[in-house]
Image (spheres, rainbow, N blue to C red):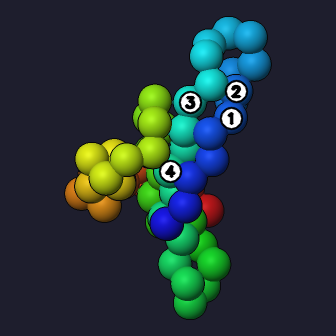
Amino acid sequence: MDSSHHPWLGDLAPPFTLLIAVDDATGTAVGAWFSEQEDSHNYFLLTRCPARLNT
């Protein structure tokens, strides 16, 4: 898991954090979660309710 704090929507919104979970064996993203900050609560949400990514 990793995160990136970035102005994802440019001037339309303040910067926020993308948390992402990647399968080490395949390099495939298996879940992602946007939040205001990187913290243990949001990592918990990522592992409990990951966004399904279409590949």
- Residue at 62%, 25% (x, y): give it: 15
Task: Write the residue at 55% across / 38% down.
Answer: 17
Above or below, 4 against 25 in this view is above
Mark number displayed over residue 47: none
**Label placed on residue 19:** 4
- Which type of secondary structure does the marked residue at label 1 adopt? strand
Query: Badge 2: few (under 14), some or many (20 or more) residues near its Cα, within 10 Å?
Result: few
Mark 3 or mark 1, which is nearer the start of the sequence? 1
Q: Are marks 2 and 1 in contact (CB under 8 Å)?
A: yes
| Residue lying furthest right | 10
Q: Please tell me how crowded label 3 is: few (under 14), some (14-19), or many (20+) other residues with Cα within 10 Å.
A: some
SS state under label 4: strand
Distance, label 4 to label 3, CA atoms, is 10 Å
**Residue to which mark 3 is pinned:** 16
Do labels 1 and 3 touch, CB within 8 Å?
yes
Q: Tell me if 31 is positioned left or right of 14 in this view.
A: left
Specify which label sits upstream in the sequence, 3 or 2.
2
Q: Which residue was labeled with disc 1?
A: 6
CA gap between label 1 and label 3 equals 6 Å
